Image: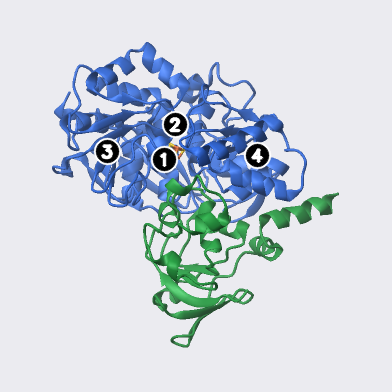
Chain colours: A blue, B green
Amino acid sequence: MTLAEKILAAHSGKDSVSPGEFINVKADLVLSNDITAPIAIKEFNRLGVETVFDPSKIVMVPDHFCPNKDIQSAEQAKMMRDFARKHKLIYFEVGEMGIEHVLLPEKGLVLPGDTVVGADSHTCTYGALGAFATGMGSTDIAIAMATGEIWMKVPPTIKFVFHGKPGKWVGGKDFILYIIGDIGVDGALYSAMEFHGEAIDALPMDGRFTMSNMAIEAGGKAGLFHVDATTRKYLKGRAKRKYTEYFSDPDAAYARVIEYDAAKIEPQVAFPHLPSNTRPISQVGNIPIDQVVIGSCTNGRIDDLRLAARILKGKKVDKRLRTIIIPGSQRVYLDAMKEGLIKSFIEAGAVVSTPTCGPCLGGYMGILAAGEKCVSTTNRNFVGRMGHVKSEIYLANPAVAAASAILGRIASPEEIA
Amino acid sequence: MARKGKVFKYGSNIDTDAIIPARYLNLWEPADLAQHCMEDLDAEFISRVEPGDIIVGELNFGCGSSREHAPVAIKASGISCVIGKSFARIFFRNAINIGLPLLECEEAVDNIKAGDIVEVDLATGKITNLSTGKSFISKPYPDFMMEIVNAGGLVEHTKKKISGAK
Ligand code: SF4
């Protein structure tokens, strides 16, 4: 069996499962946010149950439009907060929160071998820890909150192998964009993605989160890494309960095996309006930009900010554009302060926001006007995702975003450093 | 409910931001969401849609976010079902869960144009293009999903299970 199959079998009381099988899966963690919780709560109430299955396994995070961006968002956030307090769920108020997918691993709430279901498509982020984590809708989450179980169809697994050693400015974001550019936005539809190879073994935890995060952008149900020394080191001091490490069998059946040479991959830029519309940085051409966003559940972790700061320190961003930097959590924000990164950003002419999803989904804190172009470290560049339908988003890694901020056009970090 | 009406036809990879832009995710009443359904892709959709009408998409319809607001907005706009060559995973389960039928049928998609009048029989999976007289059979749901559909959605399905267990 593959890693995904083993975790799903263990959580459905079976010795083995195979792709296509419908199973009821026990959830170790059930997640929702200020946008998806209100509908989940409404559906939960319709079920006619009094209590949740286990308050210590249900998390709610106010991150999308919080701190509240307007009255309607305030009402939604309040609905979630009231429910969370009434049922004594795990809840992070503004002040201790962060973007859910940065926050949960950081707090040690997700561990290897877990199954996590979340009313947010980027719940797949936790695959980086060797957990089976997948996004669903609010009604699914209502059922999971009530019963602790949810139906799933066992996905086939596609194995991706990155051989060799990548170049200096190439990381998890480039690997995953490269995959999506290769297989398309539905290339892994309904499938689990499993990442392997020397370049993957050498990838730090934050780069792994970035890759798992964007599995959904290839249509994937989950994006999984095996636990290794890097994972265990990350979990040390965070994990407060026992966990199980699962490994794919040597003879596990994969739907496909796709191999790449990491050394040949340049930093990738996804052009509007699909994450699959990728080009290597050398083929981008001259594209002047109006805004740079560095943050989100894809690239808002400390490694991402360190990378951006390496480029921005002692430099100035181009005066014609806005550079917006959003640490993914309060912890990331504090660490960035201690390391002097925030100072470098502000001195370079960037603004630094409190943790929030904000502009990533066109909420607030950096909405684009018609005709404006933005280089963003986020995960989606759909039409209108960050503002006006005639605005454009170019997805890239934090080094490319930082270099672009300095030069006022999409640029390679090589041009700066 | 009659699943019969005129067709709105869209392309591949219609994403959830196109179906309901994130700027409206501070709304959650179905009727409010419906007012902005498809707005960025087809500004006339909401003024033209009538109860029973059908959306036809190509590949990977509903890709992107997990927002249940997307199928909710489509359903509340009066659309009776969506026909596509394939659907994004989360959109698919959300639609089934809230009772918006989706039909997978390549042949039908290739043989239906915008504005055609189409009728769908959910029980048999038969899709008839009344404008051309041609009909097609969509891929049947797995039994497990049919149970959810027949119960009227996941909440009803679970309610039955919970009361059965007592
Ligand atoms: S940062 Fe963006 S992609 Fe991540 S959870 Fe928030 S809105 Fe979704």
Q: Quadrant of the N terminus of chain A?
A: top right
Ligand 1 quarter of the rendering? top left
Report the amino acid beneath label 2.
Thr
Q: Provide residue A158's location: percent of width, then percent of height.
A: 45, 48
Measure the alpha-carbon separation of dots 3 and 2.
18 Å
- Chain designation of label 4: A
Asked if ligand 1 lies within 8 A of label 2, the reply is no
Mark 4 vs 2, N-terminal side: 4
Whole-percent x, y for residue A79 in the image = 62, 38
The local secondary structure at tag 4 comes to loop
What residue is pinned by disc 2? Answer: A356
Residue bearing mark 3: A375
Q: Amino acid at mark 4?
A: Ala
Closest to the observer: A284 or A192? A284
Q: Are marks 2 and 1 in contact (CB under 8 Å)?
A: yes
Q: Which residue is more in the foreground, B67 or A118?
A: B67
Q: Is mark 1 within 8 Å of ligand 1?
A: yes
Residue type at the position of mark 3: Val
- Tell whether label 2 touches label 3 (CB within 8 Å): no
Q: Nearer the viewer, mark 4 or mark 1?
A: 1
Disc number at residue A363?
A: 1
Q: CA distance from mark 2 to mark 1?
A: 10 Å
Disc 4: which residue: A27
Query: Residue placed farthest to the right in the image?
Result: B166
